[in-house]
Image: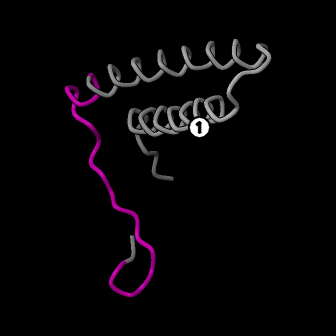
Amino acid sequence: MTGPYGVLSRVIESPPTEEEKAQIRMRLQALEVEHHDLDDVIGRLVVEPGQDRLQLQRLKKRKLLLKDQIQRLRARLIPDIIA
């Protein structure tokens, strides 16, 4: 995000409430399950000959997107430490 002087500024978010933390944890769990399931499917497809490479590539991309979402949610649960 660009500030008034053209300098990039970081939006400071307030820490999540306990209710928000519970929702984040539930979403995190669902994403982790989907990520694990995709890992299993990808692992099986890689060893099978003649599999659709485009489909495999899409599954891998989805898995990476899930990993990014998981990391962002975990970061929301960990409070910022000001040095």
**Is residue 50 found left or right of 21 in the rendered image?**
right
In the rendered view, does 32 fall on the left or right side of 10?
right
Instruction: Look at the image and give the residue range highlighted in magenta.
Output: 3-22
Q: Quadrant of residue 25?
A: top left
Q: Residue at x 19, y 26 (%)?
A: 19
Chief secondary structure of the magenta portion: loop
Q: Position of residue 24 (x, y in %)?
A: 32, 28
Q: Residue 9's spot in the image, x, y percent?
A: 41, 70
Residue that extends furthest to the front in the rendered view of this protein: 50
Q: Quadrant of residue 4?
A: bottom left
Residue under the point 58% across and 29% down? 59
The residue that appears at 39% across and 32% down in the rendered structure is 77
Observer-nearest residue: 30 or 15? 30
Residue closest to the eye, 21 or 46? 46
- Determine whether, in the image, residue 38 is placed left or right of residue 7: right
* SS of the residue under disc 1: helix
| Amino acid found under the numbered disc labelled 1 | Lys
Examine the structure image and report whether residue 29 is included in the region drawn in magenta.
Answer: no
